Amino acid sequence: MKTSPFRRAVLGAAALGAAATLASCATAPAAPASSSDASPSEAGPRVAISYEGGILVLDGTTLETVADFESEPFTRLNPAGDDRHVMVTMSEGFQVLDTAAGTTDDAALTDLVFEADTPGHVVRHHGKTILYADGTSDTTIFDTADLTESTTLPVVETIEGVEAHHGVSVLLEDGTFLTTVGNADGRNGIVVTDEDGTEIASSDQCPGVHGEGTAQDEAVVFGCEDGALIYADGEITKLAAPDQPYGRMGNAYVSETSPIIVGDYKNDPDAEGYLLNAVTLIDTAEKSYEVVPLPEGVEYTFRDVARGPGDLAYILAADGSIHVLDPETGEITDEYPVIEPWESPVEWQDAHPAIVVAGDIAYVTEPASNSVHAVDLTTGEVLASTELDVTPNEIAPAAG
């Protein structure tokens, strides 16, 4: 065993403002930049929607607008993991959006900011929220429940990175820490350390490492441009894609009650557009890797796959339908028409249809009509639809 270069430090809220790579400390949520006068007596699920220069909070049942906040021109939205808060990637770091789901409070874009140089991936696992800063490769970790229990930033643990790159980190239940390795020239693998910072395992056999997912029994998968890495039971296994030297899996869609990860798949690095027509099925128990071509017309982007009821995968395809994929068999078992057919975005940041899932309900955006839809994934019924005054881009659910 050897000691990892990653160093852990735990700081309380009072110390955060003194550390440039950590969060500034705010004493209480700020008043909303702007919000509607609506204040329901008791809030159910909520959905956050980003648009150019702003963020909406919608009632998850009726899809009525609850609040409207000003933001930067382009922001990314990630559930914080507590069924109430959303992490908004702003230029200064991860800003906390309180959707007030399940409460009688008003939604608020708070002044709580976990400072980060180029905020990137947000991971939620086993009661922890893990924030990754691409500009430093530092990882910030906190107890997710502390967001709800306090009006100040929670105590955080920071694991300092080595070289800045677009990466991601995962923390397992026993304190095992997994993080990507790379620098300004590229990314090539992962390193795994125990709770004391001692290296357990590492691999540099993952060119272009991107995306992660934690499956049943805390098996973790990272995507590579030529396959994937699985970390399980103290060991790293490399799985090769059938297409070499380029068969990229870069996004993992997981259920922590299933051993099978559904990933996106691309085998042509020069392909125009962002639509993909195959998925990767990675069985973390069997250590197997399979590419499954999708039926003609079933194409999607990284925003268009989610796991839902029955551990199934739900693909919002360019034909306008949600296609239900059984990861056990790789077969499409159902189809739910929801929106009009759509085309690939020119740039990945451009508004295009997306799907997210909360319980049995899928929330689907339709930028072409400025609409959002709520779909019961057990029946395919569209439960509610709304037309917005803005064009929806990113979406994140918060269930009460």
Image (cartoon, rainbow, N blue to C red):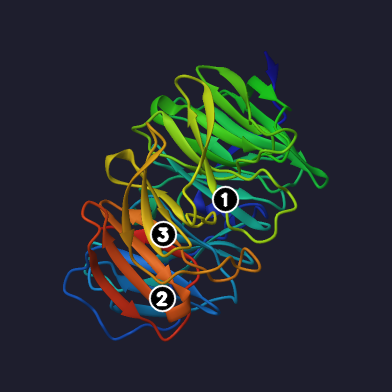
Q: Answer above or below: position of 176 versus 373.
A: above
What residue is rendered at 66% in x and 31% in y?
190
Q: How crowded is mark 2: few (under 14 residues within 10 Å), some or many (20 or more)?
A: many
- Whether label 3 touches label 2, CB < 8 Å: no
How many tags in the picture? 3
Q: Answer above or below: position of 352 versus 359.
A: below
Q: Write down the residue under mark 1.
A: 121
Location of residue 199 by image quarter: top right
SS for callout 1: strand
Q: Write down the residue under mark 2.
A: 56
Q: Is residue 127 left or right of residue 113?
A: left
Q: Is tag 1's residue or tag 3's residue first in the polypeptide sequence?
A: 1
Q: How crowded is mark 3: few (under 14 residues within 10 Å), some or many (20 or more)?
A: many
Residue kind at label 3, given as amino acid type: Ile
Q: Write down the residue under mark 3.
A: 355
- Whether label 1 touches label 3, CB < 8 Å: no
SS for callout 2: strand
